[in-house]
Image (tube, grey):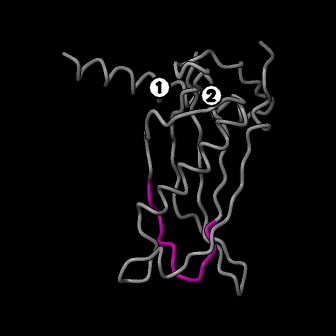
């Protein structure tokens, strides 16, 4: 199976935050930002796998600052690591003030996706080709998160 460069999975999407996306204090619902995050990460996973993918887990979704009505949410995702039939995708969400271009980090997230074959069962993924020190670091950190996630899963089964 041919390796796929990490950069080939990169996705950037934008969303103008409208009143229908917001709560009574004028900030985007956390669940709406989560939905956008899942969508962006899913597209990155599909770019790597070139197959249908499903969300298996969300390890972290940390909200750092609000997204207000009228701001632009900018979501960027990339595959961090590939395991057998699963992969971790990292997502960052920034807000942009349209009038000034000022940006601020809204949230970060790590999601795991599984690639599915035509029978709907998990299938092996092509290896991830990392080329920069940042990509190597992301891959190592994803491995640590995976080991922690699997250990927790095993502990909960007991």
Q: Residue at x 51, y 79 (%)?
A: 68
Which percent across, then down, holds residue 130? Answer: 76, 27
Point out the residue furthest to the bottom here.
Answer: 99
Left or right of 11? Residue 54 is left
Q: Are marks 2 and 1 in contact (CB under 8 Å)?
A: yes
Give the percent coordinates (x, y) of residue 42. Answer: 60, 42
Q: Is 37 positioned to the left or the right of 14 in the image?
A: left
Q: Which residue occupies 23% across, 23% down? A: 156
Task: Say which label, 2 or 1, has the lower sequence index.
Answer: 2
**How would you classify the magenta stretch by its main secondary structure?**
loop
Circle 2 sits in a helix, a strand or a loop, which is it? strand
Q: Eyeballing the image, is 46 above or below 85?
A: below
Q: Quadrant of residue 115?
A: top right
In this image, 142 relative to 45: left or right?
left
Q: Please say whether residue 19 is one of the residues in the magenta stretch.
A: no
Badge 2, how many Cα within 10 Å: few under 14, some, many 20+?
many
Residue at the extreme left: 158
Location of mark 2 (residue): 81
Q: Quadrant of the N terminus?
A: top right
Q: Which residues are magenta?
A: 62-73
Residues under labels 2 and 1: Cα distance? Answer: 10 Å
Mark seen at residue 146: 1
Q: In the rendering, at what x and y percent does residue 44 appear?
A: 67, 41
Q: Residue at x 23, y 18 (%)?
A: 157
70 above or below 65? below
- Rendering quarter of residue 90: top right
Q: Looking at this rendering, what residue extends furthest in the front direction?
A: 119
Give the answer, above or below, for where 15 lies relative to 102. Answer: above
Is 72 part of what is drawn in magenta?
yes
């Amino acid at each position: 199976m041919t390796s796929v460069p990490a950069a080939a999975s990169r996705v950037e999407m934008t969303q103008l935050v409208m009143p229908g996306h917001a709560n009574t204090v004028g900030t985007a619902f956390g669940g709406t930002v989560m939905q956008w995050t899942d969508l962006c990460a899913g597209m990155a996973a599909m770019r790597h796998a070139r197959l249908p993918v499903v969300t298996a887990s969300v390890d972290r979704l940390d909200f750092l600052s609000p997204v207000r009505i009228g701001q632009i949410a900018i979501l960027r995702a990339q595959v961090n690591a590939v395991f057998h039939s699963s992969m971790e995708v990292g997502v960052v969400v920034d807000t942009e003030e349209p009038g000034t271009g000022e940006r601020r980090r809204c949230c970060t997230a790590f999601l795991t996706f599984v690639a599915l074959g035509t029978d709907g069962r998990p299938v092996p993924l092509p290896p991830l080709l990392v080329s920069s020190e940042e990509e190597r670091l992301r891959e190592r950190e994803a491995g640590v998160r995976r080991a922690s996630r699997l250990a927790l899963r095993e502990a909960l089964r007991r």
